[in-house]
Amino acid sequence: MRINSTIILIAIASLWLFQTACKKPSDEIQPAPEFNERADTSSLVVQIKGFKNTNGKVNIALYNTGSSFNNPDQIYRSSFVSVSGNPTEVTFDSIPSGDYAFAVFHDENNNQNLDQNFLGIPKEGFCFSNNAMGSFGPPSYDKAKFNIPSKSKVTQVVDLVFY
């Protein structure tokens, strides 16, 4: 079977973008940007299912604009926590109302990278908010975004994808 080299290049480039979008510094939890704590903020609970094991950590990058989505320099909030079971839950508190999207990957070997095979296809599980998927790489912000209303608790249940 012959694989079209253009498809391979698109897949490698897209997966590189996904990997850099989820990569973060080695600290456990990145603090949220400063803003005035308001009584009308909400909570986001991300429930991640489909782990093949409980090795390593899970990385979640939360974005609050379409222009920042999948840009590692513009992550709104992130969390890099141990896998506690299947499912594993991560909660983001004090979230202002608005539209958000996130990317997740299971870093099974704790190297803070989404490991890939020689074609650039992920060897570790990953997913996006709304369980959105792109054709050759990450989905668009419009497919992955969801709304967090004021004074609410929103739960997103996502399933890891493995290739």
Image (cartoon, rainbow, N blue to C red):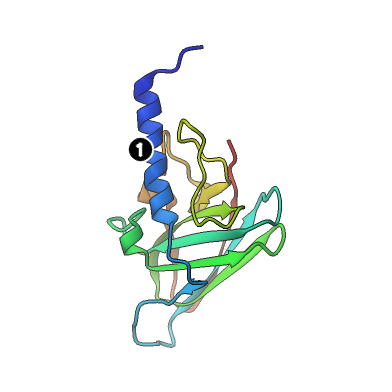
Front residue of 20 and 141: 20
Q: How many marks?
A: 1
Front residue of 16 and 66: 16
Q: Position of residue 42 (x, y in %)?
A: 48, 77
Q: Position of residue 103 (x, y in %)?
A: 47, 54
Q: Horizontally, is 77 left or right of 73 in the view?
A: right
- Which type of secondary structure does the marked residue at label 1 adopt? helix
Quadrant containing the C terminus is top right
Q: Horizontally, is 51 left or right of 65 in the view?
A: right
Q: Horizontally, is 18 left or right of 89 in the view?
A: left
What residue is rendered at 52% in x and 72% in y?
Answer: 28
Q: Position of residue 57 (x, y in %)?
A: 60, 60
Q: Position of residue 21 (x, y in %)?
A: 39, 54
What residue is rendered at 35% in x and 87% in y?
Answer: 36
Residue found at the far left of this picture: 67
- Three-letter amino acid code at the position of disc 1: Ala
What residue is rendered at 68% in x and 56% in y?
Answer: 55
Local crowd at mark 1 within 10 Å, few (<14), some, or many (≥20)? some
**Where 21 falls versus 135 (above or below)?**
below
Q: Residue 54's quadrant in the figure?
A: bottom right
Q: Which residue is mark 1?
A: 13
Q: Residue 73's quadrant in the figure?
A: bottom left
What residue is rendered at 43% in x and 83% in y?
Answer: 40
Q: Horizontally, is 116 left or right of 143 in the view?
A: right
